[in-house]
Image (spheres, coloured by chain):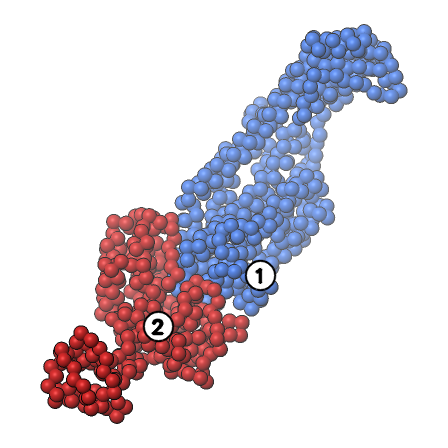
Amino acid sequence: MLEVRDVLKTYDGRAVVNRVSFDVRPGEVFALLGPNGAGKTTLIRMITDILRPDAGTVRLEGRAIDASVKHLIGYLPEERGLYRRSKVLELLEYFGRLKGMTPEAARVAATALLARVDLSEWAAKQTQALSKGMQQKVQLCTALIGEPRLLILDEPFTGLDPINVQLFEEILAERRAAGATVLLSTHQMNKVEEVCDRALMINHGTVVLYGTVRELRRQYADHAVVVRTERMVDALPGVKTVAGANGDWKLTLEPQATPESVLRALLDRGVAIESFALATLPLEDIFVKVVREGVGLDQGASRAPAVQEPVTAGGAR
Amino acid sequence: MTLSFPRVLTVARREFLTAIRRKAFFLMLVGLPAYIVVVTTIAGRAEEKERAQVLKELSTLGVVDSSGLFAGAPREIQTDVSTTDMAAPGPGRGAMPAIPMRSFTTKVLFYPDQRAAEAALRAKDVSQVLVVPADYLQQGRVRRYARGSSLFSSADRRAIAAWLAGGLVQGHVAPEVAARVAKPAQHEALYTMNRRGEFELKDDRRELVDFMLPFMFTFLLGMCIVLSGQYLLQGLAEEKENRILESLMCMVSAEELMTGKLLGLGAVGLFVMLVWVGGGLAIMGPTLAILQAVPPPSLIVLALVYFVFAYLFFGSIMTGIGAVTNNMREAQQFSVMFSFANFIPILLLSIILARPSSPIAVGLSLFPPTAAPTMLMRMSAAGAVVPPWQIALSLALLAGTATLTLFAGARVFRVALLMYGKTPNLPEILRWARQG
């Protein structure tokens, strides 16, 4: 669906995005992660053809990214805004027409989208009359109009109340069911765990994590298991330490021990187990670990020099 | 650079409709010409009224004649002044309208000495006192006393000067000669050569038309260019402040956005020009036809050509400024000096109209930032003949510069559009313009 190969972007001789490669598969929800100033916005701008890479290629459905495929992309930037004096429906029609829709088709699509986000009665109002949350829904509609094959959402949940977060998630699921691919950039790691299939994390313009969310969590898991039981026993073979309280126990394993051997030992000792799981780290902890400790895929040689993204729209993240 | 024409047209259409739907646009479209007409009319009427008021107040002139030269001078001063009622139709089809005249009479009272005359002035028995010393013939000095004086009219001075001239020869020559000395060219008719090489009468009205036509042409062109440029600037500043550009640029390229804006807002400038010219012709058409003040079609066509190139030149600069600045205040600070260039010819109007082929007029009409208004001012100046090579060179220079600024502006626009924060310095902007 989306192929990014060896993409490089430099400003004043400094690499802001340094030889980044990844694929996004059709129909998946893909997370683009990274700390503030990591180069995410620059990368997204190259995917959306707002910026041209200095080297490397970006292809969408097998075609090089240029003006001819722009209509296949819907983009909700983090730094977003609307024409304040435009009427809501007219604004959406304008965006639809820019995506190559006929006036009639744009009007029908805009009307349907407004109905979907419960804003039909605001269609004839100026956008400045809308609340911030409503404006955010209109902004989502500007990205959705034209039914883009690739939907890029940059911090879509920021500032939304729980009801609207749920609405956004439902719409995301609908788009996915309709065959669209979603590229989600967010700092809300719980959302990544909830909705994303795979993730890419960049730091200083370089890829530091790349894989399925499950794989990443396993990769950074401690060699430990989490057991829920009323009673924990001492001196289990293969267990280095036991910590916990109130029925939740974390068992750190000896290097040679496996979760299966520990489970068997617990059952042999007659422990009634309510739940047994690998002790994986939440994605948020992995994020902090990778950024703070500098661990990841590209330690050392391929690490780009310390760079700061220029102060641009959405750049100061 | 490949442009999608439908996308460009979509942007242009939106820019055009957004601009003309604004209340401020309608107010400007109707209000500005109305304002100019009202102010010009009030100013003209006020000047005329002031002149009449000065002559009306000079109902009695006290004279102390120590020279004895004016003993036989007339005891009345008759002053006729023309009014400038342009709307008054003339007698007969196609004829020049008659100029309405108004007469004022001033009585002349002689006093034996200055003290008596001053007392009469203080008692308001006379409006002014004229003291003619004994050595007037040798020195030419007179003294005039009044309770006040008008800052804006010297009609009283001219009336008294005419009385002095007539009085000097009164009794020495035939009365009709004395009267003619007082008003040697009371009904002067000046004939000047028109564009067809024919001599035609140039009266006060003709003079006014000769001034107004180039002025209005220059003003109109300058206003339309500046107006379109300002809308361009305002739109971009709003888009930057509203942070909508990133969403837009995901769908259109910077070049498509810039071209669409230039087209849409250029159309706004043309629309304003058409409405103002059309409205002006509809209201003033018959009078302008009588005065032969309707500009020739070739001049109108040339004005449109100049508008297109001048607008592209200024519009490209404005898009560049809009892209590198962060808000409207900053953008206006940068743009004001470029907008001002359009009005330089109006500041130099008297020089350009008096000498349309002077080096300064030719120079300004070749210099791209001032070429369009200056050339049109020169071409619409009464009797002026601009050599075709100067028009061709002026257009070529303007078109060449407009093309360069268009490409440079597009490069700056593309690079700077999504930059916020620090405004780039001139070397940075020049580097973007060169390299894109």
Q: Which chain gets the red colouring?
A: A
Palette colour of chain B: blue
Q: Foreground: B402 or B280?
A: B402
Instruction: Give neighbour class at mark 2: few <14, some 14-19, many 20+ (Cα, 10 Å).
Output: many
Q: Which residue is mark 1?
A: B425
Q: Is residue A299 visible?
A: yes
Sort mark 1 into few (<14), some (14-19) or many (20+) by Cα contacts within 10 Å.
few
Query: Which residue sits at x=82%, y=15%?
Result: B132
Q: Residue, x 62% and y 54% (percent of image)?
A: B368
Q: Who is closer to the viewer here, A34 or B260?
A: A34
Circle 2 sits on which residue? A32
Residue A162 in picture, x, y percent from top left: 24, 60
In the image, residue A280 sits, relative to residue A89, either above or below, namely below
Looking at the picture, how far across and down is residue A168, in whole percent? 26, 62
Compared across the picture, whether A76 is left or right of B66 comes to left
Q: Circle 2 — which element? A: strand
